[in-house]
Amino acid sequence: MKVYQAASNRYETMTYNRTGKSGVLLPAISLGLWHNFGFNDSFDNARDVLRCAFDLGITHLDLANNYGPPPGSAETNFGKILQADFKSYRDELFIASKAGYLMWDGPYGEWGSRKYLIASLDQSLKRMGLDYVDVFYHHRPDPNTPLEETMGALADIVRQGKALYAGISNYNAEDTQKAASILKQLNVPFILNQVRYSMLDRWVEDDLLDTLEANGVGGIAFSPLAQGMLTDKYLNGIPKDSRAGGSSIFLNEETVNSNIEKVKQLNTIAQNRGQKLSQMAIAWILRHPQMASVLIGASSVNQLKENVKALDNLEFSTEELNQIDAILG
C-alpha cells in the first residue's frame, strides 16, 4: 500500500462545532471504532475507512478499552494504523478512549475505581502507542464507587498529562450535574458527555440537554441510527444477513417491527428533503446546539461517505419538525 498523504482539501467541507464552552471544535460527524476495527475484521478495510474519514475532515476518532472484538483489539489496530499513516498528523486528531465496562478478570477490571481507570488508560495508551489521549471518559456510572473517587481519578489523569480533557458517558442529568460540580471544584476541563440519542430514543431531551448547557459541557451522540433502524435497511422487511435478522443483543425483529411504521413515515419526510433517512436522522440530532457531534460507525468507505452527506442539509423547517414530532409521538 502506497504511503498515505491526507487530502489537501480535508477541512473545506466538514462542519466544526464548539464543544460546550471549551476551546475544542469537533467535526459534526465523528468516527466511532466500536465495531469493524478489531482483530475479527479486515485490517485493510479499517485502514481505508480511517484514511477516508480524515480526508473528509473527520478529526475525532472515538475508541474505548473494550472495543473490538476481542476487547482491546480496536485500539491495537488503530495504533498500528496511526503509526503507519497518521503519525505526522497527530496534532490534527482528537482521539478519545474510555473505561467503565468489563475489560479484565477480577475486582479491578471494570466500573469506576481509581485503580481501574488509571490502569486501563495506561493499557490503552500502550496499545495505541500514544503519550496521551485528547479526552478520556468514564464509560458508565458506577453505583458503588463514590463519584468523588471516579472524578478524582479523571482529574489526576488530566494533571498527569495522560489526557487533555475529561469526559463521561451514559450519565443522566442528575449524575452529570454532580460530576460537573466535582470537576469544577478540581479545576479540570470537563467537556463531553457521550450519550445514546436518536429519533427513536429521545431521553436526553427531558433535562440532560439543559444540564449540559448550564455547565458549558458538550454532548456527543452515539447510536444515532438506532442500530440501523433509521436507515433504509428494514423498509421492506428484515434481511437475513442484517443485525436484527441475526443474533444481535442490540436489535431484534420485534423491536424493528414495532417501529417500522414510524420509520416508513420518517423516510417519506427524508425523501422530500432530498436525503436518505440515515442522513436526516443525523442532521436531526445536530439541530441542538448542545450536540457538538454525532458518532457514526462505518463498515465501508461508501457507507462513511453516504453518512457525511447528512451535512449537505442540516436545516429543518418548523413544519418538518412538527411532522417528525407527530410521527414519533
Image: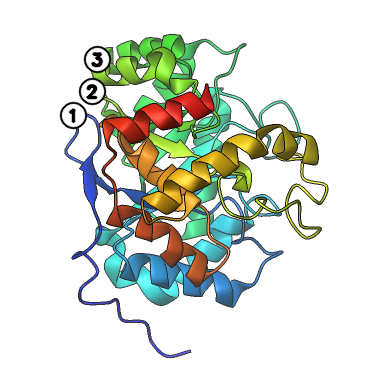
Task: Specify the amino acid type for callout 2.
Answer: Gly
Task: Tell me which residue sits at (67%, 66%) in the image.
Answer: 41
105 displayed left or right of 162: right
The local secondary structure at tag 1 comes to loop
Q: Residue furthest bottom?
A: 2
Residue 75 in which image quadrant = bottom right
Q: Is residue 70 left or right of residue 299?
A: right
Cβ–Cβ below 8 Å for labels 2 and 3? yes
Give the Cα separation between the discs numbered 2 and 3.
6 Å
Residue 21 badge: 1
Q: Which residue is mark 3?
A: 214
Amino acid type for the residue under numbered disc 1: Lys
Give the percent coordinates (x, y) of residue 277. 49, 50
Does 176 appear above or below 201?
A: above
Spatial CA distance of label 3 from label 1 is 10 Å
Name the residue carrying label 2: 216
Q: Nearer the viewer, residue 129 or 90?
A: 90
Asked whether 144 or 200 is in front, the reply is: 200
